[in-house]
Image (cartoon, helix red, strand yellow):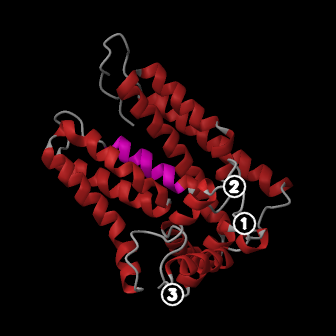
Amino acid sequence: MRDEPEPNNPSETPIRATDLWAVGLVALLVRAASLLIARARSPYWGGFVVDDRAYHEWALRLARGEDEGGVFFLSPLLSHVLAGVYAVVGERPVVWLGIQAVLGAFTAVAVAVVGARVFGRRAGLVGGGLVALHGPLVFATESVLTETLHLALVWGALLAWPREGAGGLPRAVGVGLLAGLAVLARNYFVLALPLWAVAMWPRGRAAVLAFVAGAALGIAPATVHNLAAGEAVLVTSSGGVNLWLGNHPGANGRLHLPPGMTVEAIQDPARMARTFADAAEAEVGRELG
């Protein structure tokens, strides 16, 4: 790792390579220790519950070459990446958990670099250190869920953000591509893309267009798949589900089901998809794709 250039504030010294190695090493060691402790003591180690089971089983089907018909319900990137891992090492989720530990360490380093660029070395180190030690982020390493992969893509995009006289249009395309892949990891992130495009504007109209092109390229595989399945769905069909769960008349800020729905109906992703598809079909008066 190279030292970062001087930040905007001349009173700050640039973040050093040794700083970044320290942040990354701490983050990696903490996550490795968490995995070892979970393996030794957690009753949930090696098992799957709801979403993690769905991602795992989907990855296994993909690794076997089984076709996945229908519109995506869950964000697709994790299972497709996981399928590639399983194709190489077999059904060994622990290998993916180890990769997640590395991704988590990368995110901590990326936060440190970006924070130092914007606010100076001390802020960068504090931000990177917080990510390295943040309990929920460490815990996410132990589960086959989307958070770790998604955050690595988001902060990888911010790390690649074009700067004055550095990279220009190729960097803008790369940022857009990583942001688009972040949408495939967690579909709600699509709402951030217009804000990112606005933030790209100081780099010029061409940079904005390059960013949009990169984002479209990243998202396109899911959209093409869904169109082939018969529905014009950008990424997944579950966005409305989450919006409804959080905003129906009885919502209280926690998981509170709409009237007429049971907990059993959402414990399995396939049943959840069918339950909400039935509700949507009743509302629009036609079958969904």
By secondary structure, the bulk of the magenta-drawn segment is best described as helix
Rendered location of residue 68, percent (x, y): 51, 85
In this picture, is 56 found above or below 41? below
Q: Which residue is mark 1?
A: 259
Q: How far apart in space, not on screen, are marks 3 and 2 (Cα)? A: 27 Å
Q: How far apart in space, not on screen, are marks 1 and 3 (Cα)? A: 22 Å
Label 3 close to label 2 by CB (< 8 Å): no
Rendered location of residue 60, percent (x, y): 60, 80
Work out whether residue 222 or residue 256 is closer to the camera in this orientation and state it: 256
Residue 16 highlighted magenta (yes or no) = no
Which amino acid type is marked by label 2?
Answer: Gly
Q: Report whether 101 appears left or right of 233.
A: right
Work out whether residue 42 or residue 232 is closer to the camera in this orientation and state it: 232
Residue 238 in view in this figure: yes
Q: Report whether 174 appears left or right of 122.
A: left
**Residue at 40% over, 34% down:** 114
User: Callout 1: few (<14), some (14-19), or many (20+) C-alpha neighbours within 10 Å?
Assistant: few
User: Callout 2: few (<14), some (14-19), or many (20+) C-alpha neighbours within 10 Å?
Assistant: few
Rendered location of residue 212, percent (x, y): 25, 56
Q: Which residue is mark 3?
A: 287
Which amino acid type is marked by label 1?
Answer: Pro
Q: Which residue is mark 2?
A: 250
User: Callout 3: few (<14), some (14-19), or many (20+) C-alpha neighbours within 10 Å?
Assistant: few
Q: Which residues are magenta?
A: 149-160
Q: Secondary structure at mark 1?
A: loop
Which amino acid type is marked by label 3?
Answer: Glu
**Residue at 66% over, 67% down:** 51
